[in-house]
Amino acid sequence: MEKIAKKKPLSLLKEGESVDDVFVVKIKKGFIHYSNGFAFELVLSDNSGKSLTYKYWGGPDEQKVRKIYDSIKPDCVVRVKGKVSTYKGKLELTTNEPDTIEVIEKGRYDETSFVRVGVKNTEELYNKVTAEIDNIKDEKLRRMVKNIYCAREISEKIKKHPGAIEIHHNWLGGLLEHIWEVVELCKKVCEFYPAINKDILIAGALLHDIGKLEELEITSRIKSTTRGQLLGHITLGAVFLERKCQEFEIDEMTKNKLLHIVVSHHGKQEYGSPKEPMFAEALIVYYADELSSKTAEIYDFIEGAKNDTEDDFMFYDRIKRNVLLR
């Protein structure tokens, strides 16, 4: 069976453009009655990292419109015929009868149209990251970190896992790429400060985001798991690491330092860290994590924005300032 190919990413859609393309349903909203019939609203996405509000304006036949609505489930892939318009300053996609929206069965579409693929070789990245484990001198700590990274259920998962749903490293293999960047940045700081406990620093860098393996999952898109929504990757990582430290009989101070690196690596309580960094190695992991994520984010914004304007600058709402694009 020939697969339905995606024609254009959401990030390139323009006002007034007619659309006949496939998207993944990120959010399904309610079914409503309006003056000319019945309608519903979705939020659609694809591998461009963008989302777009979609509105289906149906006719007076409630049963017909409800049948379409009921066939659509969150995370399913749909083929949409409609038009791009602007509402309250934002682009949206609308369908008016007789144009349609239909659910596309799994196997009839290319899954990479909805989850981005990283450009780096994940096998090479995995080998680089795991090679750092052998440089940990503390035998128990080295054994524990190697056990975590070499366990089949983790090694296979981490090679394709994204680093986030949006914002930074939100592609297949993104988590491993982010961890590698954090490790390399931490190693560079060690060149300036020889007193750093390199074992704690590198182990913390390797394990700071381990909770994301349980926080995120890939369906037809990147999304949070139930535990991820309820607990978040910092809590999940700390729970996992506490258990592993006990299993490998890691001494109390080393265990507490590693746990502190995990719970403080977002730097501030308002950013989700229950504790702020309280020793040098925790501070370094926090800034390395911040530098990796923020650099990836701004490069991603620049690449996307270049297609939206010929200006040299564009305002980035997340950071509340203009960004130079050229």
Image (cartoon, rainbow, N blue to C red):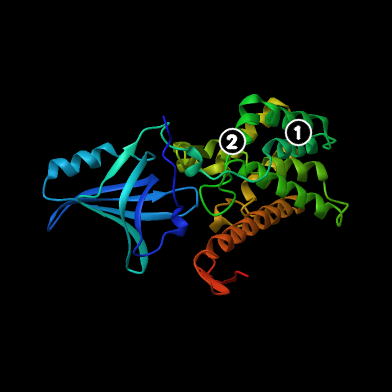
Q: Position of residue 73 (x, y in %)?
A: 32, 38
Q: Nearer the viewer, residue 298 or 189?
A: 298
Q: Determine whether 314 is above or below 64 in the image.
A: below
- Badge 2: how crowded within 10 Å, few (<14), some, or many (20+)? few
What label does residue 239 carry, if any? 2
Whether residue 147 sits left or right of residue 97 in the image: it is right
Disc 1: CA contacts within 10 A as few (<14), some (14-19) or many (>=20): few
> Amino acid type of disc 2?
Val
Q: Give the residue furthest to the right.
A: 194
Q: Which residue lies at the image location 52% right of the left edge and 63% below the top edge?
A: 307
Residue 219 locus on image (x, y percent): 46, 36
Residue at 12%, 56% (x, y): give it.
Answer: 36
Give the alpha-carbon distance from disc 1 to disc 2, as whole Å.
17 Å
Secondary structure at numbered mark 1: loop
Q: The residue tagged with tag 2: helix, strand or loop?
A: helix
**As drawn, 192 above or below 256:** below
Q: Which residue appears at 81% of the width and 55% of the height?
A: 189
Q: Does 280 sit left or right of 113 as displayed? A: right
Amino acid type at mark 1 = Asp
* Quadrant of the image containing the N terminus: top left
Please indicate whether residue 324 sits to the left or right of residue 100 in the image: right
Is 132 left or right of 313, judged from the image as shown? right
- Mark 1 or mark 2: name the one nearer the start of the chain: 2
- Look at the image and tell me whether residue 260 can be seen: no
The percent coordinates of residue 10 (x first, y second) are 44, 54
* Residue, disc 1: 251
Q: Position of residue 277 (x, y in %)?
A: 68, 54
